[in-house]
Image (spheres, helix red, strand yellow):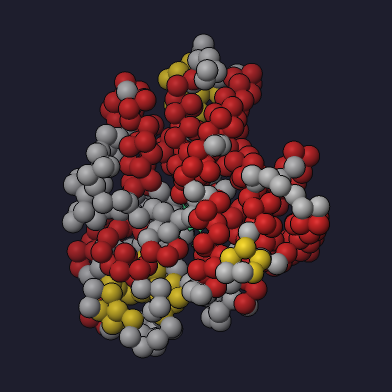
Amino acid sequence: MGPDRVPAEQDESGFRPYTAKAAEPWAELATDRARCPVSHNAELDAVQITSYEGVKEALLDHKSFSSTYSDLWPLEEPLPEHKQVLGASDPPRHTRQRRLLVKALSASRIQRMRGFSQRLADDLIDAIVEQGTSFELITAYARRMSEEHMAELLGIPEDERAAFARMAKVFEMSIEDRRNHGFNDELDAWIKHLTDMVRARRSVGAAGDDLITQLCLATVDGDQFNETEIAALIQLLAGAGISTTQQAIGNIVRLLDSHPGERAKYLADQDGLTRSLVNEGLRHDGPVLGLWRRTLGEDASVGGVDIPKMAKVFPVVAAANHDPAVYDRPDEFVVDRDWSELPLHLSFGHGIHYCVGMNLAMLELEVGIGTLYRRLRNLRIRPGFTPQQIPGPIVRSWPSLEMEYDLPAGKRTP
Ligand code: HEM
């Protein structure tokens, strides 16, 4: 046994993120949670946490569970300082960067994007309708919704949006994947471009509501962000905020498709149920399976179980969301749960790193899902098409969903 494992009596969980039944891992996760919510996952060689309270406890204790080793996989060394940005940083660096973004992504700021969001959803559906009655959901709709919202939020000029969308795919890759696929030079060129864009906006004293301009103008504790830091923040936002929302749209559509009774319930009261549907979709099958941390000191523990120094720790958000101690019938998809009465699901994380883009994500999902089902009648996964999931410890998503619907399509949203 390596030095970074929990004691043997908690050892060996049954959940295998790379080889398990990726579509329905709930039974394996339930067995692990019932046996011991803090256990050693052999496939990941990491400490796995599967209870709602345990995941919350680890995510709240940022002093013991560091984020500075996290890329998409906990590294052996902390990231270099200039790469310790927001989600991959600990206080005090994190506190300073976060304070500014919270303001820029506040509920009231994001609500001002609602008109944009609705027009975009309708435009994308118009384009789908022009092509006929079948389409691929992720490329034609989910990805476009996410990319365009991010570009609008940041204030990327119209004529650079296609290039930004291409580069966003590189932002999402792990350091290793970028290196292995030879994307590092292209990434460096784009980061230089962002740095120049920031410098130019600063030099002309740009005024605007977009996030890049806000980052240029902001002063935190008397000092400003430098260009490199802003470019890194933009890269991080695009990396964190595009694929997640894209995946969430796909996951919710697939859930509705595989639960015809809940789908009918939703369609009967779309206005009343879209928000609870989105929360239930995120709870039942959110895009984040688990997060990564590393223990820095000797005194880390979860649920009374000591975790050794330098252990790789894997709080399984998806397992927390299916904890029967918190949710009734946890493995069932129920579109009309009363979320005002329920503890919030952990799909947006918990503690200091709680998703800063949550308001934007909820806007995109509510408008995106609502418009899709209002306008495309009898929307369904094409019979004969079997969605495939890519197994792994971080993301739960359906990379492709071939859909069809019946004409006539509904009118644009007034
Ligand atoms: C359904 C969509 C989304 C999901 C499920 C999601 C999930 C999460 C989770 C679980 C975390 C916590 C990470 C951790 O503790 O290590 C997080 C953090 C973060 N998210 Fe999201 N996210 C979504 C959308 C977005 C969007 C749209 C943006 C950008 C506008 C965004 C930006 C971020 C950033 C910057 C962080 C790091 C925050 C910090 O460390 O303080 N996310 N997200």
- Residue, far top: 408
> How far across and how far down the image is residue 408, in percent?
51, 11
Query: What residue sits 52% from the left and 53% below the top?
Result: 103
Tell me: residue 302, above or below residue 201. below
Q: Can residue 88 be seen in this view?
A: no
> How far across and how far down the image is residue 243, in percent?
55, 49
Q: Is residue 161 visible?
A: yes
Q: Give the quarter of the image for residue 224.
A: bottom right
Q: How many marks?
A: 0
Q: Give the quarter of the image for residue 237.
A: bottom right
Query: What residue sits 53% from the left and 50% below the top?
Result: 105
> How far across and how far down the image is residue 130, in percent?
64, 18
> How far across and how far down the image is residue 37, in percent?
25, 68
Report the front residue among 335 and 109. 109
Query: What residue sits 31% from the left and 64% below the top?
Result: 56
Tell me: residue 130, above or below residue 206. above
Tell me: residue 12, above or below residue 384. below
In the figure, is residue 203 to the left or right of 320? right
In the figure, is residue 52 to the left or right of 291? left
In the figure, is residue 117 to the left or right of 389? right
Image quarter where the N terminus lies is bottom left
- Residue, far front: 222
Query: What residue sits 53% from the left and 43% below the top?
Result: 109
Report the front residue among 24 and 89. 89
